[in-house]
Image (tube, rainbow, N blue to C red):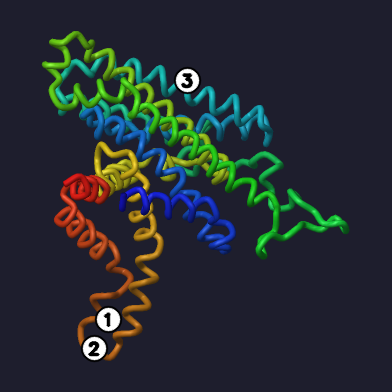
């Protein structure tokens, strides 16, 4: 009950984010949280529900982003480019997932993890080397569809001026945010439907005891490959949405290993095998990444007269405190925040 309350509050905050938090930075953080909730949830489908450890999730995310980015660059800022580019990136991700899954999911978990890590590394190198198509290390800059331009008037008054709702102009920025929010909401609900379906039950059975699942007639490799493809497709679609929002795609924003580590931490903090844990984990981690430095700077100023403390609270040491926060969360919530609260609630 507590978990669902927390998720509901986060969901409402994201739904009304443009009106609650009106600065540019807050809009960026809210959109990132929406995208990463789906990305973390799709990864939870792999690691939490099926027991598959993969390091290639950002590769599929990047394929979707680069697909949309290259199409928008080549065809111009139209919906046809978003659709064709996103489709191309998603299909490529699905094909790669089938190949990797069919060839590697028969082996032990550690070997499969190494295969996915190698595939992700190769994709990172390819994105950097094929600069003619991908922009190399600099990435690609392009324009989003006209609907998302700040100058676009969604609602106007009698004089033709942009209408304001709760002090917020109804322009293209609002349209861009709700494109991200609604698309991510649909993808998240689709993932929730999967884990609550008979397929979700089979995946949990495979995670708990692979040999027993195979003994009672389930084709384990086929199921594992299928869920690997589903997770890859969702990650690629999310990448396309992220590309449209950012209007920039590069190796650091979509393919870097640090993003993969972030996703893993988000799932662990939220609670593996819960799906709603992704909402809590992503929100907590994103707020810490974007606002912990500001909080520490304020705390350092407030404790200026205290010896040593301002030095410890120096904003440059934010990663140290983020690490301590993570250790405390793992200690007090061993099954993740959602997982631990759910277990306590069931007793």
Give the residue pinned by disc 3: 91
**Image point 38% across, 49% down: which residue?**
7
Dot 1 or dot 3: first in sequence order is 3
Q: Can residue 117 be spotted in the picture?
A: no
> How many numbered badges does the structure rendering display?
3
Crowd band around label 3 with a 10 angstrom C-alpha radius: few (<14), some (14–19), many (20+): some
Query: At numbered mark 1, what does the secondary structure look like: helix, strand or loop?
Result: helix
**Image point 28% across, 13% down: which residue?**
222
Crowd band around label 1 with a 10 angstrom C-alpha radius: few (<14), some (14–19), many (20+): some
Give the residue pinned by disc 2: 306
Query: At numbered mark 2, what does the secondary structure look like: helix, strand or loop?
Result: loop
Residue 217 position, x and y percent, is 19, 8
Give the residue pinned by disc 1: 310
Tell whether 307 sits left or right of 301: left
Q: Can residue 182 be spotted in the picture?
A: yes
Classify 213 as above or below 145.
above
**Image point 41% across, 20% down: which residue?**
94
Query: At numbered mark 3, what does the secondary structure look like: helix, strand or loop?
Result: helix
Tell whether 123 sits left or right of 182: left
Residue 19 position, x and y percent, is 59, 60
Residue contact at pointers 2 and 1, CB within 8 angstroms? yes
Tell whether 207 sits left or right of 98: left
Residue 208's disc number:
none
Residue contact at pointers 1 and 3, CB within 8 angstroms? no
User: Farthest residue toward the front?
Assistant: 347
Q: Work out how far the residue at label 1 is from the one at label 3, CA to CA, in angstroms.
A: 52 Å
Classify 295 as above or below 196.
below
**Image point 34% across, 50% down: which residue?**
280
């Amino acid at each position: 009950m507590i978990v669902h309350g927390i998720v509901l509050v986060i969901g409402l905050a994201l739904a009304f984010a443009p009106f609650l938090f009106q600065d540019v930075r807050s809009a960026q953080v809210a959109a990132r949280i929406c995208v990463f909730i789906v990305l973390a949830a799709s990864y939870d489908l792999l690691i939490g529900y099926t027991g598959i450890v993969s390091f290639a999730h950002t590769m599929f995310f990047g394929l979707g982003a680069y697909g949309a980015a290259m199409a928008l660059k080549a065809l111009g800022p139209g919906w046809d480019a978003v659709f064709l580019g996103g489709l191309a990136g998603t299909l490529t991700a699905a094909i790669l997932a089938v190949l990797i899954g069919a060839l590697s999911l028969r082996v032990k978990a550690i070997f499969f993890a190494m295969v996915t890590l190698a595939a992700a590394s190769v994709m990172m190198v390819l994105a950097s080397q094929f600069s003619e198509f991908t922009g190399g290390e600099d990435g690609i800059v392009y324009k989003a569809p006209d609907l998302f331009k700040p100058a676009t008037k969604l609602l106007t008054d009698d004089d033709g001026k942009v209408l304001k709702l709760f002090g917020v102009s109804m322009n293209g920025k609002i349209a861009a945010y709700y494109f991200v929010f609604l698309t991510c909401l649909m993808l998240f609900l689709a993932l929730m439907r999967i884990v609550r379906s008979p397929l979700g039950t089979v995946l949990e059975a495979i995670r708990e005891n692979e040999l027993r699942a195979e003994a009672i007639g389930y084709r384990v490799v086929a199921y594992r490959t299928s869920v690997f493809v589903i997770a890859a497709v969702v990650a690629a679609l999310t990448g396309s949405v992220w590309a449209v929002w950012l209007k920039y795609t590069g190796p650091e924003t979509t393919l870097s290993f640090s993003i993969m580590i972030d996703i893993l931490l988000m799932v662990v903090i939220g609670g593996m095998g819960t799906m709603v844990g992704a909402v809590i984990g992503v929100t907590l981690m994103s707020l810490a990444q974007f606002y912990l430095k500001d909080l520490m700077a304020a705390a350092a100023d407030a404790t200026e007269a205290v010896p040593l403390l301002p030095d410890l609270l120096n904003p440059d040491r934010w990663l140290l405190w983020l690490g301590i926060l993570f250790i405390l969360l793992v200690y007090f919530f061993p099954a993740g925040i959602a997982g631990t609260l759910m277990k306590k609630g069931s007793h």
